[in-house]
Image: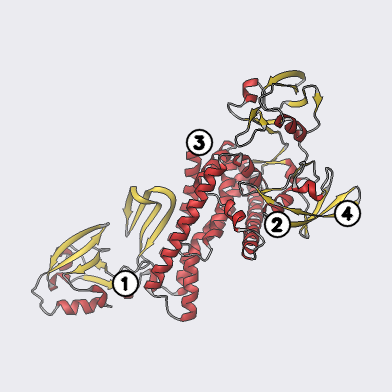
């Protein structure tokens, strides 16, 4: 239940703030907004206020703002009906769309007056008007006199139609959605710092290597325990946070790393490998004490009676110096009972436990995660605003650079399509990570929401049909050609874009299901840690 509520919270905020951007600028520009919906598909509940219907729909994977004139309706819209007029008595209402009149082809009339003139040829004759009102079609039998007091426009000349706005206004309306997503962290992060957020202490420390995995790319490249990372690809690295971001932004790449070893400078090259989860696995890490941070529910460690904070001193009377040594011993003992000597407070205890094979391989695991020192970042009201705005600006810049660098390397062939595909995450994984963030408290959930919001805003600016970036591309082409693309061209582009997005969504969900077989939550948590 926590996962579902956290997912709905994150997606609800992201969709609402995005669509609110479109909505506010559209209203400010005078465009007729017909619907504001959170979710797609069948209407769950809603209400109408003024000319706009506000909805919550069944599929919570997005939302939309429906503006008149977006999709080439090809109908006439009734802008107003005078009170007490013949048109009102005939049953017309403001906001009605006239879909058809007898067998007359409405698309052949560019203005309402042309249609009125045609109907005036025989003013006594009654005509069947089919009007659309609240997604229902109604038939009205009306003669020419029944149109008196009615003010209507064709889509082509309706001044409040989206398509009839200037390029500048349409750009503002389209861009407002992604802009709101990019602006959301500037609201959320000050709240995060008022509530207080804990971050792993190692992220603020110098990147001194505490562990090099045997036979890993870093081991083969010559990295050693105690090396201090100075630069990656020529960029200065001051903290583990910088190092994590640099490694994660370069999957399946040859990286030049400068390290300090015993006062000497060494230049090493490493091939960063993309893991099955789409994350960079390099085989090195920060120093970690052999102490328990969290215990997985139902794990051998929980059944054996281990507790958070237990410090592991030895395994089968063999002293352990750090987490990595301890973990390597446990991995080699699947289905074998081992004795761990631990320190709990002022007591020493011996606990027996049997590691179980991890899913996907035969290595042993007892279901514990490492304990890490944490830093609490909590400020007063005004300082929270200052620190939150600074952190939001930094986060937007880092995620933007990371994403643009990733795209550049993908386009230039420095990152394979396979590695790029593995990095996709969909709604299932977002739901899982949302639930994990929610367990850390409201501040952690808001921080995760800010992180996802930036990614959503940037991705929406990609020049892909169906996304806001695709609409911006249409506007750019229109400004160059001095005329809009034809409706036929737009329809083809929309179909191509829709097919592409469906493919990406299917791939993302497939990745989610594949990743959930492994320790993806732990892996993604480490990636998210880098941006804390």
Question: Tag 4, which secondary structure?
Answer: strand
Q: For the residues marked 2 and 1, what is the alpha-carbon distance in whole angstroms?
A: 52 Å
Q: Nearer the viewer, residue 117 or 402?
A: 402
Q: Are marks 2 and 3 in contact (CB under 8 Å)?
A: no
Taking 184 as reference, is 293 left or right?
right
Residue 30, placed above or below residue 272: below
Residue at (50, 36) in percent of width and height: 2
Q: For the residues marked 3 and 4, what is the alpha-carbon distance in whole angstroms?
A: 49 Å
Tell me the residue that label 2 is attached to. 253
Q: Nearer the viewer, mark 1 or mark 4?
A: 4
Which of the labelled discs sits on residue 265, or is there none? 4
Q: Residue furthest right?
A: 263
Q: Residue furthest left?
A: 124
Q: Residues within 10 Å of mark 1 (few under 14, many from 20)?
A: many
Question: Tag 1, which secondary structure?
Answer: helix
Tell me the residue that label 1 is attached to. 155
Residue 471, placed above or below residue 216: below
Residue at (70, 57) in percent of width and height: 253
**Colour scheme used in the picture?**
secondary structure
Tell me the residue that label 3 is attached to. 2
Residue 243, image x and y in percent?
74, 51
Q: Nearer the viewer, mark 4 or mark 2?
A: 2
Question: Tag 3, which secondary structure?
Answer: helix
Question: Tag 2, which secondary structure?
Answer: loop
Q: Earlier in the sequence, mark 1 or mark 4?
A: 1
Q: Earlier in the sequence, mark 3 or mark 4?
A: 3
Q: Earlier in the sequence, mark 3 or mark 1?
A: 3
């Amino acid at each position: 239940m926590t996962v579902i509520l956290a997912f709905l919270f994150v997606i609800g905020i992201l969709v609402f703030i995005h669509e609110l951007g479109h909505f506010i600028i559209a209203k400010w520009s005078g465009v007729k907004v017909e619907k504001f919906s959170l979710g797609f598909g069948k209407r769950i509940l809603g209400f109408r206020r003024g000319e706009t219907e506000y909805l919550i729909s069944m599929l919570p994977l997005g939302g939309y703002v429906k503006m008149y004139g977006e999709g080439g309706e090809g109908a006439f819209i009734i802008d107003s009906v005078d009170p007490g007029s013949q048109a009102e008595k005939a049953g017309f209402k403001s906001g009605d769309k006239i879909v058809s009149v007898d067998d007359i082809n409405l698309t052949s009339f560019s203005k309402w007056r042309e249609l009125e003139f045609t109907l005036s040829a025989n003013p006594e004759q009654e005509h069947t008007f089919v009007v659309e009102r609240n997604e229902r079609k109604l038939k009205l039998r009306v003669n020419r006199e029944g149109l008196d007091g009615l003010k209507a426009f064709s889509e082509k000349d309706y001044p409040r139609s989206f398509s009839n706005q200037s390029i500048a206004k349409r750009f503002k309306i389209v861009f407002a959605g992604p802009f709101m997503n990019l602006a959301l962290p500037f609201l959320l992060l000050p709240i995060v710092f008022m509530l207080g957020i804990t971050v792993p202490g190692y992220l603020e420390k110098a990147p001194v290597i505490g562990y090099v995995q045997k036979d890993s790319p870093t081991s083969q490249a010559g990295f050693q325990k105690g090396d201090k990372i100075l630069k990656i690809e020529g960029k200065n690295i001051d903290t583990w946070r910088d190092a994590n971001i640099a490694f994660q932004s370069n999957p399946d790449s040859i990286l030049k790393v400068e390290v300090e070893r015993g006062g000497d400078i060494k230049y090493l090259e490493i091939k960063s490998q993309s893991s099955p989860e789409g994350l960079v696995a390099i085989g090195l890490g920060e120093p970690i004490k052999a102490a328990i941070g969290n215990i997985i529910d139902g794990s051998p460690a929980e059944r054996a009676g281990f507790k958070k904070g237990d410090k592991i001193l030895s395994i089968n009377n063999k002293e352990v110096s750090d987490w990595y040594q301890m973990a390597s011993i446990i991995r080699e003992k699947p289905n074998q009972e081992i004795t761990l000597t631990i320190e709990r407070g002022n007591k020493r205890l011996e606990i027996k436990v049997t590691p179980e094979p991890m899913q996907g391989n035969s290595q042993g695991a007892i279901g514990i995660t490492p304990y890490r020192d944490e830093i609490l970042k909590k400020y007063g009201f005004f300082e929270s605003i200052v620190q939150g705005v600074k952190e939001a600006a930094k986060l937007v810049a880092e995620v933007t650079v990371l994403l643009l660098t990733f795209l550049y390397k993908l386009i230039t062939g420095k990152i394979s399509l396979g590695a790029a595909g593995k990095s996709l995450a969909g709604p299932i994984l977002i739901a899982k990570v949302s639930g994990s963030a929610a367990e850390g408290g409201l501040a952690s959930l808001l921080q995760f929401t800010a992180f996802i919001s930036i990614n959503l805003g940037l991705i929406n600016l990609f020049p892909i049909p169906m996304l806001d970036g695709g609409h911006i591309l249409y506007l750019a082409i229109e400004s160059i050609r001095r005329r809009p693309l034809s409706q036929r061209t737009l329809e083809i582009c929309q179909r191509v874009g829709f097919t592409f997005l469906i493919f990406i969504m299917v791939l993302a969900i497939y990745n989610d299901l594949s990743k959930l077989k492994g320790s993806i939550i732990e892996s993604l948590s480490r990636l998210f840690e880098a941006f804390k």
